[in-house]
Each structure stands twice: as structure tokens, then as C-alpha cells.
Image (spheres, rainbow, N blue to C red):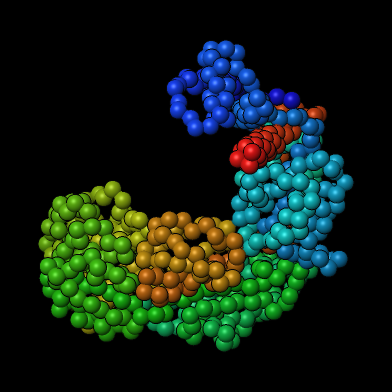
Amino acid sequence: MGLLYPGALWLLAIVPVLVLPYFARERPSRVTVSSVIAFRAIHAMRREHFGRWPRLDWTFFLEAAALILAALAIGVPYVSRASNPIAVVLDNSAAMQATLPEGITRFAKAQKETDAMLANQDANSSVVLYLTSPRPHQVGEHPTTLDEARAAIASAKPTDAPNNVATLLNLLTDLSSGTSFTKVIFASERPLASGAPSRITAITVGDPVENYAIGSFTLSRESFGAEALHASLTVANFSTKPRELTITVSGDDHRLGTAKTSLGPGETGLVEFPSLSPAKIFRAEIGDHDAFALDNVAYATAGSIKKTSILFVSPQPADADGLASIPDVVVTTRTPDAFTPTDLQGIDLAIFQYAIPHDLPPVNTLLVMPTPGDPVFGFNVAQVAPVQIARWSAADPLTDSVNFRLLDIRAGEVFATHPWMASVVDGNGGSLMMRGERQGHRFLALGFNPFPYLGRRNLPMSILTLNSLGYLAGVGENSAGYRTGQPWLVPAGIKTVVTPSGSRIAVTPGTLFRDVSAQGIYELIDARGAGTPRAINLSDFTVSDLEDIAPLRVEAASGSRAQSAFLDKIPLSAFLLAVVLALLVVEAALVYRRRTAALEA
């Protein structure tokens, strides 16, 4: 037995103060009475003299006991009891959803075997439960009893996110090398390599299972303004036999195409759908079902199919007229004097011609012959005439299919080296085309004017313009690059995210969204209530390979040793405070009774 805060015993010094009122007596005074009884009472009072030993009645001892117990309660007395603290690390990652030959999932088997192991532990054991996905975390804030832990394990659910192996290893190392637990139970589909700390008891449920899987599912639009989409899927055969897999792609619940591919054991292949009809949400599925259904399905969205809104800011607004001839493009023009930052709301990309915004735009932006010395971008430019193109990268999407030798640019400017933008096309004396990313947005700077857009009447420049706008609008990019378990930044203007389960989560733009433990379509809702779908997939062949499961290597920390005995400190403050309250109630009852009797007399 002991005290957690012995300094609280100084409060016992208050107890002697209770004696002081018993030394004080009322001074006698001359009183005119009309009754002999009152006279006798006053006479009896006058016989008392101040300074004599006090007469301590029962109320003093009740109050003194209450103060002593309250002081002890503040010091938090405790009694020690032998305990058996246990840490349970339950793997709830995506791979635990695989069905075993006996007809239950790996996760259900892990729950069953962990529950059986806890049932055989000492009744005084306390348990701390950890789940591993989407990142290792403790369930609840405090240790629980065996029954509470078993109930928590029974109610746990697997996620669609893979484990972060590095953080999982750190957790197991900390739990097994610290002094907080006598035993660590680790239930997972992954075995432990030899040499693991003896304090860890492993429950392995990862029997090899044949599996077929979809990895990445990407959509691209071949050119800016085109409607048809090109879909590419990576598929794998994680089995011991050759397989012919059938993949079906649907858009907005309508079947758009089917393809077949033959894969050998352990082989990965690419399946392409060159021309898919427009849709908002695409779903790919392997027709051959297996023991792991999660990676038989993948999602993608095609936000680029919608009309692309462009804000054109220029002292020459007429230069934007040709852009309206591009399919699915909507153009809004502003002069620099009339432009305000609110004009960028709801815009897909902005073009500033001979102008610079006062702040970094929150959208992808094309800067055409920007003015030098601006405080936002800090371009250092020099005027050149005529413009001579010296070097460019033929493999870059911005320069794809552009014949620069046919470009006739009479005048322009070249850029000096920029701190965060890289050169794409060089001219004599500097860069003619630079690109870079800032705060999650793309920026492209041109040292010459490609406008107005003339289409086939100036084909080389028109191709370069389409490439530039396509780069800024995200054309030809992977639209399914988000994975379960990997947080992403909330885009500007987004106020709410709706998860695949239908839960609505309020978010702040620019912060990380971490609740990505489920595969499917997430709806990003802006302030106006408009939604943008975002596809989140498992897309991890290391998780889908259920045949070859790599063991986890947990190293014992240097200097760590097993604990033979643990003591739980059970605080008694609550019990003491209950006694104090009972004493005060008894005192109040007795005082009330005595006053009632005196009044009746």
C-alpha cells in the first residue's frame, strides 16, 4: 500500500484548526428577562469562561475524520495487486479478408484463435488491444478486462487498406521490448521470422491461397476535347497454373466492354480498352471469382469528360475567341482591371496573357509572356526577336507531335533559371517554356503568344496549345492514382467528403484526409453542393499475392528483458471520498435531529 501523491499529507495540518472554535466562548452580558427559565439559562452560560479546555463533542470527531479522509483521498492511496498485462495486436488489413479453404476468412480465424488464447489467461489479466490498419492504433484509451477485450475483438472489422510494414514492426518492437506487458499476442496472416522476441506469441492464419487481381486501373483521353477514353488495367495471376481471365468494364452501371487475357503462373499483364464511351464512374471486374474478392474489382473516374472551364485574363480578350471551337471547352474572359480572385471559383484552369495575378492562383494556370519582376513568380525575362527554338524534349507530353521547326514566332521573351519551374523548351538565351508545381497546382509559363487558337490554320502552334491545355486540365493522366490507406490533401473549395459507406465527413481544404480505409468511390462536395467523384483502390500486388507471404522480422531491442511480475496499483480515493460523504450526511442528520428535539422541548 502507498500514496501516489504523498505531498497531499500536508493538508492534515488543517485538522487542528477545528479545535479553535471550541476555545471560544460568548462573553456574558446583562439581559432583562421575563422568565425564570431564561434567567437560569443565562446564569449557566455565565459560568463558562473563555480559555478553559474545550469540550469536544461528537461533531468535532466526525468533522476531523472527514478532513483526514479527504486529505488521504487527495494523496491517492492505493493497494498493489499482482497483474498480467497483455497486448493483443490484431491484423485487420486488407489481406485478412481472404477466404481460407475451411470457408472462413483469415480475419475470422484470427478472431477465433485470439479469443481462445485470451480465455485461457489469468482472470486478473488486463488487455490493451491494437489494430494494424490503416495504421497501427490502440483501441480505447485504457487497459480493459479479459471479457471487455474479447468483446472488442469480436466486434472488430477488417479494412480495405494494407499494413504499413515499417510502423507495424516499430509497434511490435516497442511492445515486446518495453516493461508494460508480460505477453504480446500477434494475430496476422504474416508469420514472424526466426529470432523474434520470446515475449511475442504469434497466431498465423496466412495459409497460401490462389488469387487473381486487378492492380492499376487508369483512364486517359488521347487528346484535348475528345470524348472517347482509353482504359488500361494491370492484372496478375497469383496461382500455380496458367489462367485465362475475363475483364469487364462498365460505366455508370452499363457494360462498355469485355476483354480476355492469358497469364502464366505468377505473371502480370496489361489489358487495354482503347475506346470507352463517356461515363462518370467506371468499374472493372474480373469475371473469375476467387478467395479474395477485394482485388477482383477496381474503380476509376473520368472527371475530364466534363466540360473544361477556362478563365482567360488578358488586355486582349479577343485572343480567347478561338478556344470556344475546341469541344467541351467553356471560356470566360476578363481584362486585368476587371479580374478578381473570386473569378477563379469553379474554374478548371486559368490563362493570364500579358498579366500576372496578385496572388498564387488556386487552380492550374498558364502564364503567357508574363511581365518581369512580379512578386508572385519572380520571373527574370529578356526580350528576343525573332524567337529561335534550340532544344526540346521529344518524349514530353507537352511537346508530343509538335514540329517546332515549322513554328514562326516573330517576337517573345526568354526566362532565366527559375527556383521551382523547370525548362521544357529552350531558345537562344534562355527557356521559352517552363513548368512547375506549387501548393498542389500546375503552372506553365510561355515566352511567346500561342493565341488566338487557329486550329488547322496553324497546326504546329495549335497542337502545342492543345498539349498545354491538356497538361493543365489533366488530360491523359491516371485518374485512379489514389490507394486505400494513403491520405490525400483536400482540394480547394471542398467542404465535405462522402465515403463509400455513405458517411459525410466535414473537411478543411489543404489538410490531409485520412479516412481512406475503404475501397470505392468518394464524393468530394464543394460549398455549392456539387460533387466530384474520386476512386480509391487497393491497387497493391504485394497484398494480392496470397501465395508468397513474406515473414515479419521483429528484432529484440538491446538490453530488454522479460518481466516476471507486474503489480497493478488500485487507487482507493473513490472509496475514501464515499466515506467522507457518508460522514457528512450522518453529521447533518444528527444535527437536524438535535435541533428538532430542542425546539420541541
- Front residue of this view, candidates 157 and 316: 157
From the top left corner, tell me how far across and down residue 182 is, in percent: 77, 35
From the top left corner, tell me how far across and down residue 172 is, in percent: 69, 41
- Quadrant containing the C terminus is top right
Q: Quadrant of residue 179?
A: top right
Residue drawn 81% across the image and 66% down it: 104
Q: Residue 472 vs residue 126: left or right?
A: left
Q: Quadrant of residue 125?
A: top right
From the top left corner, tell me how far across and down residue 525 is, in percent: 43, 71
- Front residue of this view, candidates 369 and 484: 484
- Front residue of this view, candidates 470 and 346: 346
From the top left corner, tell me how far across and down residue 580 is, in percent: 65, 35
Residue drawn 23% across the image and 77% down it: 332
- Front residue of this view, candidates 586 and 222: 586
Residue drawn 22% across the image and 54% down it: 376
Q: Is residue 584 visible?
A: no
Q: Is residue 152 visible?
A: yes
Residue drawn 12% across the image and 67% down it: 337
Eyeballing the image, is 433 above or below 164?
Answer: below
Q: Residue 96 vs residue 497: left or right?
A: right
Q: Residue 196 vs residue 277: left or right?
A: right
